[in-house]
Every structure is written in structure tokens, then in C-alpha cells.
Image (tube, coloured by chain):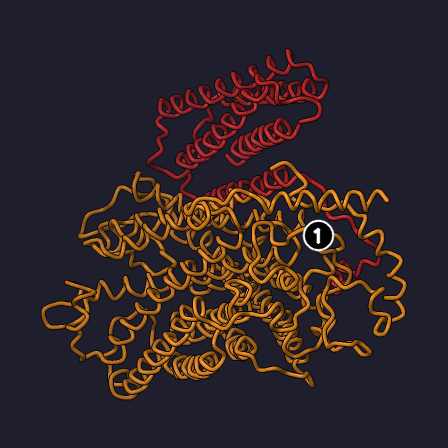
Chain colours: A red, B orange
Amino acid sequence: MSELVNNITLVEEPEETLSMNPRKFILWLFIVSIIMLFAAMTSAYLVRRAEGNWLEYAIPSIFYYSSVVLVLSSLTMHWAYLSAKKDNFGNLKIAITITFVLGAIFLYMQFLGWVDLVNENVFFVGNPAGSFMYIFTGLHGFHLISGIIVLVFALVAAFRLRIHAKSLNQIEIAATYWHFLDILWLYLFFFLVYFH
Amino acid sequence: MATVAANSATVAHAEEHDHHEPQSFWRTYIFSEDHKTIAKQYLISGIFWSIIGISLSVMFRLQLGFPAMKLDFLRPILGNWINETGKLDPDFYLALVTMHGTIMVFFVLTAGLSGTFSNFLIPLQVGARDMASGFLNMLSYWFFFLASVIMLGSLFIETGPAAGGWVIYPPLSALPQAHKGSELGMTLWLISMALFIVSQLLGGINYITTVINLRTRGMSFSKLPLTIWAFFLTAVLGLISFPVLLSAALLLIFDRSFGTSFYLSEIYIKGEALPNVGGSPILFQHLFWFLGHPEVYIVLLPALGMTSEIIATNSRKPIFGYRAMIASMMGIAFLAFIVWAHHMFVTGMNPFLGSIFMFLTLIIAVPSAVKAFNYITTLWRGNIRFTPAMLFSIGLVSFFISGGLTGIILGNSALDIQLHDTYFVVAHFHLVMGAASAFGLLAGVYHWFPKMFGRMLNEKLGYVHFWLTFIGIYLVFFPMHYIGISGFPRRYYAFTSYDFTKNIFADMNSFISLAAIFTFTAQWIFIWNFVYSMFKGRKAPQNPWKSNTLEWTAPINPGHGNWPGEIPAVYRWAYDYSKPGAKDDFIPQNVPYSQTPESNLPHENELIGLEKEIEAQNLNDQFKQPH
């Protein structure tokens, strides 16, 4: 407790209030809430798994490939951001479009992963080991759709030339969210592979 | 020179803002993005819900206190839930306790308390034009409204509302065939709560962003009023814990409607085995209480924050231990996340784990005691003014102490085995969390009503309301401890089967019920006062309580943007009451040290040099940004 008290020492000099854009700050808080959602899910997975009676099955290999696709889309997203920073509108449009397409391909591959699971006789209904697989991929997919919607807004803004070196907020918000969804999937995927 | 130019530009700009086109009725009063209107919407919804929530409790108190009573007169409201013999339907009794808990915890003391005062006070006390995002704020209220409509609707469906207790433990809540209240009522409960969580997250994200980003010049974290600290930490708690409840509810929805087995395992109903295997009902309890425990503090912290402000103002003394108050709130907020399993001592958990959670739980007594001590030392030798708000704040401290003491008893895993799920627990949390937070809410309404509606509440009625409620609540909950110790379990429909429940304690149960009806009746004094004063009350002066915080520098009826012209800068903390040497017994936060040489302490004289820097600071004024 004394440490806490020390941390709140009275500031004796004027202090600038944080000058971060409130919208960006809101996004970070939104990300915190998503992290908590998935933290709850993955800890539920661990608690349940520790109780035994756990179905063993192979993780469909397509999830490895879809992970690569999503990482690629993160790279193109960053390319889009750099292009916007340099006012290179041609590259910006191409980069956002590629990101959008890669996002859609990722979602389709996740769906194929579900098909593979069904072929393996792992169903949503049944042993929680399988249900959790569907929940993780499905919930992440749901958030990715929201990421794609944010991306579409950025795409429209890019085509209307509203994104440029002096107006980067929108592309920064879209990029931060997209990278977060990428990292979130990699976390979920490694988690699923490791605790299988 | 540049500063002066910038300032005059702001004034000119602000003047433009005064000439905003008047908005339509719908945008001004219904789909408003103004934090003050949204706060009032939350307050009135909260009052509506508290009337419903408390009425439900009076209905089941009638059943508990007078098991032989004919309840035919309730038939116009409850319809067929009163059977032919004039008795309350036992299934509906369970629905009543469930809905009472849900409504009071979530709709009144979370949305009605945080929603009202975080929305109203954060921009006004940190010196902001409005919330960081007015649109998200509006969305937050309307998600809450939608959740309210669904929850209210579930009271009127044929199979009745959810009836598995406000904690909705599976498998009871997961199997529609288990119980009437687990059918459509439970589905509606889950949908409503999912919307409610979205509403709370939108609101909480806004509160945090506003406190961090939109403080006025000079308003450093160490100058924030304790109210804002409390709202801020409450929002952080909600942001971290509500998504976990959403996870738990989501898995429950899948179990109920899609046939998964997260919480269900090897269950027989009417001799037939269900297909579900491999689930764990205890898993739900872990997820639920990870929210459920922080929720207790989400309910209590705003009340404690407002009490700090009101007690300091009306004792005409600086709050005792400002930094200790912040530290203790942070300590409570941190501990809130690592004590959840003390709700689960009797689930067959490892006794060693139980003793760890017991240890962590008992540590909460330390920051709580710091707070109680600081309230009392602030009152000590103060120049106390007993306004209604002050009385309710002192009442809160009383409930906080008497309810908190039994928390130390219940936190012991060995004692909890005896007391778990008895009326002792009911008495404990109703005092420390229910009554204390409700008193915080009422104190807040009495204190900030002049700022909200520009009129004063009637003080005489306030005193009557306080004493009847204060006495009434102790009459209800003190005897409940005895009933709990003697072994009465909670959530039981009637206690007519055993001699000791029937003969020895029946009169005590009747007494509690009478006291509950008495207390409920007293609340109508407040409601009449509230509605009457809103339109006909005495006109409020600029600063009725002679308080230091920024909201009293805004016009009596603040308009769009709260302050005409520039937002005031802040030079000092919010608790300069009765400062030796000062002209008045209060110095508002926006008075610079250079204007009060007679009362400055040596180190404060040194701060005079910094005033220019504060004034030159980058002002996070939303009017200066395109919107």
C-alpha cells in the first residue's frame, strides 16, 4: 500500500493533460474489453481442460495457412499506413484493398477449417474441447468482421481522399484495430496448439 | 501575448456556440448527446426501476412475514401468480427474488448510480465541455433502455421471468425443462443482460477517456475531486470485469439454445439421461464471480466517492487523508479481482485454495477501514452542517461499518460453511452494498439536485425521509442477522415446516416485513419531493453548499458546453475549506494562489509562479476542435 501512496505524490509543477486523440483512446479501451473477453474464454478453457474427460483431435492444418494470410494482411495494412503518411494515394488504395481481400480470404479459410472439423467428427455440440474450438474461431471471426467494417470506412475515406499525411487518425485507428485482431488470432491459435 | 490572443479567439468561438440552432424536442430531450440530459435520463430510469425492484421485495416479504395471509388483493397486479386459495405461487416467489436482485444490483445501483453521477459530474468537475464521445454516450443510454424494456417485458410473460436467482447458476438456468423460470424468462434475462453489458462498456469507456483526456488546464490527477477518482476506478473495474460476464453469458446461451455442454454434464431429468457430457457447472461460478465480486465495488465506489465530497463540504474541513483515500480505493479496486472464490467456499474447492482466498478477502478490511477512519476524522471537530445530503452520507458511513464488520465474519471460510446462503449473508450485503450504495445515491441526489434542475429539494421533507429510511433499514436488516445465525436459508418460499422456524422466529420475520413496508412507504416522501421540487422547488443559488468544485462555477442551468466562454483553469485541490487566514471558509478550485496571499502556505506561494504556465497550457477544449 505504501508503494501506492508513493506513486500518487503531489505534482508540484503544471502538468499537461494527456493530448492523445480521444477516439484513439476509446479504441484502446475497447481493445482492453476484448482482451478481457478472450482472457475469460481461454481461462475457462484451461479450467475445464484440467478436469479431464477431454476430447483429443487434430487441429485442421488450414488454420496454419489462414494465420499466414492474416499476418500478411497486417503487413499490407502497415503498407497502407506508410503510404498515407507519404501522401501516396495510389499505393494507399491498393494496400487497403489488398488488406480487405486478405481479411475476406482469412474468414473463408476459417470457415473451411470448420468444415474440416466437421469431417473429423468434431462438432459444436458435444465435448467442450470441440465446442471451445468453434467458440474461439467464431468469436474471433465475429470481431474480424467488425474490423473489416472499420476497414471499409477507411477504404471509402481513402477513395474520397480524406486520408492524407495531415489526417491520419482514421487510418491509424483502422490499422491499430487490425493489428490487434491479428495478434489476438495468433494468441488464440498458439494457445489452442499448445494446450491441446 | 500569444496566450491572450488565443484566449480571446476562444471566447469569440464560444460565443458562436451560444448561437447554436435550437435542436428539436427529440434531439434535446430524447436522443440527446448532452451528458447532463443523459444523466437525468439515467436518474429517472433508475428511480423507476427502484420502485419496481423494491415493490417486488415487499411482495415476497409479505409472503415470508405472513405465510398465512390471503394475497388476493395483489391479483390485479400479479394475476394468476396468486392461486385460487389466495396464495403466492411458489415458482413466482423465486422469480420475485431473482428479479429483485437483478434489478437492484444492475439496473438501479449500477446504471442508476454510475450512469447518473458519472455522466453528470465527470465533465462538470474535470472541466470538460461534454463526454469524449457524446454519440457513444447516447448509445450507452439507449442500449440500457432496450435492456430495460426486455427485462421489464419478461415480468409479464406467461412462464414468468427468470427464477434461478440473480446469480443464474447452471444447470438450473441452463435447462429450460428444469423450472418455469428457466424457459423464455431466462432467455430474455440473458439477452437483456448482454445489452446491459454493452451499455456499461460504452459508458465506462467514455468515462475513462473523459477523465484522462479532457481535464481542464491545471487539473492534474492530484487535484481531482475524490468523486472523479471513484467514478474513474469504477469505470476501470467495469471495463475489466463486464466482458467476463459476457463470456459467461455467451457460453450459457450456447448451452441453452444450441445444445453445447460447457456447463452441463451427466444429468437425468425424469429418469431420462440428457445428451450433455463433459461440462462443468463450477466453471460458470468462477466466470460469474469474477464479475460478481468487482460488481459489488462498482456499486459501492461511486457512493463512497460522493460521500467523501459531501462530508468534506459539509464539515467545512479538508478531507482527511486525500491521498490515503485514493490509495485505499485503488487497493479495493485491485483486491476486487482476486477474491471472487470467497463466494464459492462450499463448492468443494480445495481447502488450501479456500484459505488463500480467505486471506485475500480479509485484506480488504484494511483499505475499507482506512476509508471509514478518514470519514470519521474528517467529521471530527468539523463545523458540521446537517443538510439532508450530509445526513445520508453519515448514514452511509454507518451502514458501511456495520455491514462491513459482518463481512469479516463471512470472509472466514470455516464460518462461511455455517452461514453460507443464510439470511446472515442477506443482511450483510444489503447493509454494506445495498443500503450504503442507495444512501450514496440519495445523498448525491440531495447534493446535486440544484445543479441538475436549478432548484432546491425541500430540506424538511429531506430530514423526514432520512430518519424514516435510516431507522427503517436498520429495523429490517439487524434482526435478519439473528435469523441467519439461527439457520434460515435464503430463497425459501416459506418457513412453516419446523417448530423453530414456525414458532420461535415467525414473529421476527413478521417484524422485518412490517419494517420493510414502512421503509418502502417512506420513499414516497422522496419521490414526491423530487417531482415537486423539479418544477416548483425554491430557485437554487449559484453555489448553495459553498463548495469548491468546478461544477458550481458553471451557470445555475448549464447549457450546451457547460461554461459560456472559457473553461476555468484549476490551481488548487478541491478541499480548501476553513483554511486559516482565508476570508471565506472555502476557496474554490479556480481561485489562483496569487489572489489569496493571506491564506497561502509557504510552498503554495512558490506555486504562484506556475500560474502563468497553467494558463498557457494546451486546453483540451472540445469547442476548439472540429465537431
Closest to the observer, A43 or B388: B388
Chain under numbered label 1: B
Q: Residue furthest left?
A: B84
| B453 to the left or right of A173 | left
Question: Which quadrant does the C terminus of chain B fall into?
Answer: top right
Please say whether residue B403 is visible from this viewpoint: yes
Closest to the observer, B13 or A162: B13
Closest to the observer, A57 or B494: B494
| B44 to the left or right of B119 | left
Question: Which quadrant does the N terminus of chain B fall into?
Answer: top right
Residue B133 appears at what percent x and percent y?
56, 43
Query: Quadrant location of residue B471?
Result: bottom left
| B567 to the left or right of A186 | right
- Which residue: 46% across, 64% down? B345
Closest to the observer, B590 or B357: B590
Residue B409 appears at what percent x and percent y?
51, 76
- Which residue: 65% across, 79% down? B315
Residue B203 appears at what percent x and percent y?
52, 49
How many numbered discs sit on the rendered protein? 1
- Which residue: 53% across, 58% down? B294
**Location of residue B60 with respect to B335 vertically, above or below:** below
Please say whether residue A50 is visible from this viewpoint: no
**Location of residue B496 with respect to B260 vertically, above or below:** below
Residue B332 appears at what percent x and percent y?
61, 63
Query: Quadrant location of residue B598?
Result: bottom right
| Residue marked by disc 1 | B216
**Location of residue A90 with respect to B386 vertically, above or below:** above
Query: Quadrant location of residue A182?
Result: top right
Q: Residues within 10 Å of mark 1 (few under 14, many from 20)?
A: many
Q: Secondary structure at mark 1?
A: loop
- Which amino acid type corresponds to the residue marked 1 in the rendered image? Thr
